[in-house]
Image (cartoon, rainbow, N blue to C red):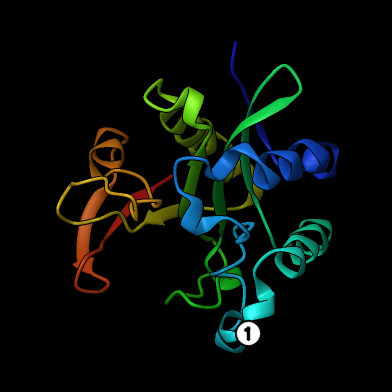
């Protein structure tokens, strides 16, 4: 059975074990990010030392101070999925700064559990939980083409459409902004 929870310090150990190991078996190019890219400044991301232990430490610190937020999928006490769902204001590299708007920017699912609806379950849980944390809207920016390629870590467009997100403007040459009022 798969359980979805908001990431708290109680799940930090299992989250780190997931990010240290199985999270990126199928996408090794993202190993060492710890979902810090959009929380980091451009200067931090340009620093080669940011990958790995530095980002791991930032993830711990940012979870503790509330800057890093999201949801984990667990089977027993093992994390098998992660979804970054955070305030727009915390994602430094994204446009938007409304206090009551969240952004969903990243999904990582253990290769063994891919294709089993884990990302959809995390999204569904988050859409019910985000209003409890003061959010009135949530946005995502999947690939506009609808494809879900190796760089499609933002989730497939079809998943957001099924969840009631409405497409808006392009945010760059590949991604479309999709928003749902909660």
Q: Outermost residue, top direction? A: 1
Q: Quadrant of residue 71?
A: top right
Q: In which quadrant will I find the N terminus?
A: top right
Question: Which residue is nearer to you in this view: 129 or 121?
Answer: 121
Horizontal placement of 100 versus 154: left or right? Answer: right
Position in image of residue 124 (x %, y %): 46, 31
- Badge 1, how many Cα within 10 Å: few under 14, some, many 20+? few
> Vertically, is 12 above or below 106?
above
Left or right, 160 with respect to 168, comes to right
Left or right, 114 with respect to 129, comes to left
Q: Is residue 64 depicted above or below 164 in this figure?
A: below
Name which residue lies at 71% across and 25% down: 78
71 lies above or below 94 = above
Q: In which quarter of the image is residue 96?
A: bottom left
* Picture quarter with the C terminus: top left
Q: Can residue 103 be seen in this view?
A: no
Residue at the location (23% across, 38% down)?
Answer: 158
Q: In the image as oriented, which residue stretches furthest toward the bottom?
A: 43
Work out whether residue 75 or residue 90 is closer to the camera in this orientation and state it.
Answer: 75
Write the residue at 48% across / 38% down. Answer: 127
Name the residue beneath numbered marker 1. Answer: 47
Q: Position of residue 100 (x, y in %)?
A: 54, 61
Left or right: where 98 falls relative to 80: left
Q: SS at mark 1?
A: loop
Q: Is residue 24 among what the camera can see?
A: yes
The image shows residue 142 at horizontal and vertical percentages of 30, 54
In the image shown, does 136 or 24 lie closer to the viewer?
A: 24
Image coordinates for residue 126, horizontal then vertical, percent: 53, 38
């Amino acid at each position: 059975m798969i359980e979805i929870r908001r990431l708290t310090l109680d799940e930090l150990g299992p989250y780190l074990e997931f990010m240290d190991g199985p999270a990126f078996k199928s996408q090794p190019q993202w190993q060492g990010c710890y979902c810090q890219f959009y929380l980091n400044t451009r200067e931090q991301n340009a620093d080669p030392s940011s990958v790995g232990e530095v980002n791991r430490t930032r993830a711990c610190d940012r979870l503790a101070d509330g800057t890093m937020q999201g949801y984990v999928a667990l089977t027993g006490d093992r994390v098998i999925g992660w979804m970054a769902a955070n305030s727009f204001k915390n994602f430094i590299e994204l446009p938007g700064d409304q206090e009551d708007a969240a952004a969903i920017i990243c999904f990582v699912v253990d290769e063994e559990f891919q294709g089993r609806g884990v990302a959809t379950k995390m999204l569904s849980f988050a859409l019910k939980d985000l209003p409890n944390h003061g959010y009135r809207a949530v946005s995502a920016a999947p690939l506009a083409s609808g494809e879900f390629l190796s760089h499609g870590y933002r989730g497939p467009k079809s998943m957001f459409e099924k969840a009631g997100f409405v497409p808006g403007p392009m945010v760059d040459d590949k991604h479309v902004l999709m928003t749902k009022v909660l």
